[in-house]
Image (cartoon, grey):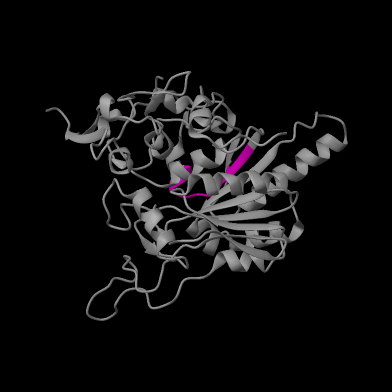
Amino acid sequence: MSKKFWEELPQGSVVLEAGSSAEFKTGGWRSMRPKWIEENCIQCLFCWMYCPDMSVKVNAEGKREEFDFDFCKGCGICALECPGKKGNKAIVMEEEGK
Amino acid sequence: MTTKPLKLRELAKGEDRFTHGHRMCAGCGAPIVVKQVLMATDYPIIASNATGCLEVSSCIQQYTAWKIPWMHSAFENAAATISGIEAMYRSLVKQGKIEDKEVKFIAFGGDGGTYDIGFQSLSGAMERGHDMLYICYDNGAYMNTGIQRSSATPFGANTTTCPAGDVIPGKLQHRKDLTRIMAAHGIPYVAQASPANWRDMMKKVQKAFEIKGPKFMNVISPCNRGWRSKTNDAIALSKLAVETCYWPLFEIENGVTRVTVKPK
């Protein structure tokens, strides 16, 4: 979305498009990166429920998929809440860029 | 309308009505609260939002994270705004100008916009009996402006306007029990919820939507910037708040109090 001048804005600065923030990528905020280890995942979907940035993708069958790194801010809630399988976490946090 | 089944796999197939790209801090509790509230039901929802973190970071210029009609109001009048919208909707339906789609009305406010500044409009809306749900996400201080004390700040807490040190040990006053104050208005439904207990919270939202009249819900929402905690512990802290009875989960339906989650 390009910058608009005041003459081009709708009256009262009303936002006419629902959910337009999807065009604003917040992934650049991240300093820690969650890593999903599929074999330890029990598909409990707690990460999806507790993600404040709606960055855990779930497919049509209700199965978890890879993170949406365009929006993940790397808070680490998913990694802390992940129950994992037999004591092995399915989500671990790694330093970004390593 | 039938109530939605509260199974994670079923819920995950639905569309998020609060979407990504909002600019709340990493690990904030408020978007989790909003997402769970909007997910709990399939009813069309119109929301108003008091000024606060949630409002300023979810709708910045042409970017909005909301997929529902959403109106920003000033700090003190989220409840007045939504009661106006509700009254207009009711009037237009009565005049036959629009079709009744069972629209539900929600107002979101932080603890500053609910306990302190927005209290008069909230109390007024509850007394007038509008068909609305007010949700307060309580993070315990004015976090948006830099952690100033509010009347929701617990006793002894360290904020920038009651700093703990040699002179005072933190906030000297006790927090206001807003949930009970709202219950004293004699409204049909008042509840306290926590995002860590998502099923309990969504059940309460569903229950509230089936009741006609003013409803109030107080939800704890940890703030890692203000509580000086880590970014990853919003859910862990709201769970602890329930387990330690700092934030008991109960509902008051027509004057009858019921504890919904008993900590072990």
Q: Position of residue B169 (x, y in %)?
A: 29, 77
**Which residues make up the magenta segment?**
B46-55
Q: Is residue B175 above or below residue A45?
A: below
The outermost residue toward the bottom is B167
Q: Who is closer to the viewer here, B258 or B208?
A: B258
Q: Left or right of B138: which side holds B5?
A: right
Would residue B135 be counted in the magenta stretch?
A: no
The outermost residue toward the left is A98
Q: Left or right of B137: which side holds A11?
A: right
Kindly identify the residue that appears in the image at 46 percent across and 65 percent down.
Answer: B152
Report the quarter where the C terminus of chain B lies: bottom left
Kindly identify the residue that appears in the image at 68 percent across and 65 percent down.
Answer: B256
Q: In this figure, what is the number of numbered marks? A: 0
Q: Position of residue B210 (x, y in %)?
A: 71, 45
Report the quarter where the N terminus of chain B lies: top right
Q: Does the rendering let one see residue A25?
A: yes
Kindly identify the residue that appears in the image at 64 percent across and 37 percent down.
Answer: B46
Q: Position of residue B253 (x, y in %)?
A: 68, 59
Q: Is residue B21 above or below residue B73?
A: above
Q: Is residue A62 above or below residue B171?
A: above
Q: Who is closer to the viewer here, A5 or A74?
A: A74
Quarter location, residue B145 = bottom left
Q: Position of residue B106 (x, y in %)?
A: 62, 45
Q: Who is closer to the viewer here, A45 or B44?
A: A45
Would residue B51 be counted in the magenta stretch?
A: yes
The outermost residue toward the front is A86
Q: Left or right of B259: which side holds B183?
A: right
Kindly identify the residue that appears in the image at 54 percent across and 48 percent down.
Answer: B201
Q: Does the rendering let one see residue B117?
A: no
